[in-house]
Image (cartoon, rainbow, N blue to C red):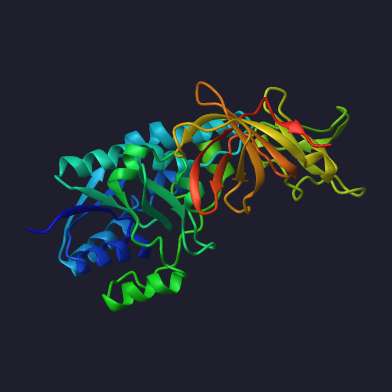
Amino acid sequence: MSRRIVVAMSGGVDSSATAALLVEQGWEVVGVTLQLYDQGQAVGRANSCCAGKDIHDARRVADALGIAHYVIDYESKFRQDVVEPFADSYLRGETPIPCVLCNQTVKFRDLLGIARDLGAEAMATGHYVRRAEGPTGPVLLRGADPLRDQSYFLFATTRAQLDFLRFPLGGMTSKDETRAIAGRFKLPVAAKPDSQDICFVPDGDYAGFLGRLRPGAADPGDIVSLDGQRLGQHEGIIHYTVGQRRGLRLGGGPAQYVIRLDAARRQVVVGPREALGRVQLQLTGVNWLGEPEIEADLPVMARIRSTRDPVPARLTLKENGRAAVSFLRPEEGVAPGQACVFYQEDRVLGGGWIAPDAIRPGN
């Protein structure tokens, strides 16, 4: 009797190729697609279908592979656990990462529970990360393709979840390999383009989406210098993030960068590039996947944004899910609401959320 595995099927080429590989390996594959949002509401157009194309594509792939496929309405949970925190984070002057929240809640908590209820012995996703067996249990590793590695977005995966999860695409060295798998199985999504935006803001208009969800989110305010001098006006702090240079419209003079966002005063604080450097930061909500006991001041490679390479740092874990990270050289673009993920070589040791009140400037 074949073993049962649930595949989280989004309708894209990655999850579709994942399902195909597992069928080929002899698993009894069950595809599950979560309907998470109403696309018509997301883009503000009444004639948009309710994320129907992706669901339809997932069903077509399941039919092509001859596997069972279920669609489950998780819109209310997704709104509560991902969309609402996303909006509130922007209003606090942070730069949120909804994909981490989605993996942490709806996918690796709720969908994993569904997989267990369906009698599966594992759940697979199309993420580009690797899972390996270590001396004390499974460990999470960066994807083999550094351009596709998604470990930054999975730092909150717990040990118990990792024990149940599988990532068949983690060893792929390019997206072409994944598309070749989809082509070999003649899947209807083999040439489907990758999505570039947050799924529930498919048109990329974050400001418009937030304005509909939180009226007043785009209230204007002042752009000020580090010493408090008014330099101009902005049309809402939701349009800005730390490190941003474009869109300030301050006229001539030396280049100015967003240094921080003061949501309480509705201020965008700007300054020269050298003011962006940070040598230490504090984290909250830390998830630790390393060994049970570590010494303070642990050498790690730390990554402050998904698009940045890890850099040398020292890590000290504290009580109540907190940690301190010190960089060997100042890091630019450290933004509250983003994550800091730590590694030793390819192994993911964990990560946490960058706190807004404890980011110390570099020298």
Q: Is residue 33 above or below residue 159?
A: below
Nearer the observer, 54 or 129 = 129
23 above or below 219?
below
Furthest-left residue in view? Answer: 1
Q: Quadrant of residue 176?
A: bottom left
* Quadrant into which the C terminus falls: top right
Name the spot of residue 216 as percent of width and height, x first: 60, 29
Name the residue located 21 percent from the left edge and 69 percent from the top edge: 24
Quarter of the image containing the N terminus?
bottom left
**Residue nearer the viewer, 236 or 5:** 5
The answer to whether one can see residue 44 in this image is no
Residue 46 visible in the snapshot: yes
- Residue 299: image quadrant is top right
The residue lying furthest to the right in this view is: 253
Q: Give the side of residue 223 with respect to residue 146, left or right.
A: right
Total marks in image: 0
Rendered location of residue 186, percent (x, y): 27, 76
Instruction: Tell whether 113 sits left or right of 67.
Output: right
Up-down relation of residue 24 to residue 106 (above or below): below
Please state if 276 lies on the left or on the right of 121 as rendered. right
In terms of depth relative to the viewer, which is nearer, 313 or 29? 313
Locate residue 33, reporting x and y percent.
27, 51
Residue 99: image x %, image y %?
Answer: 46, 45
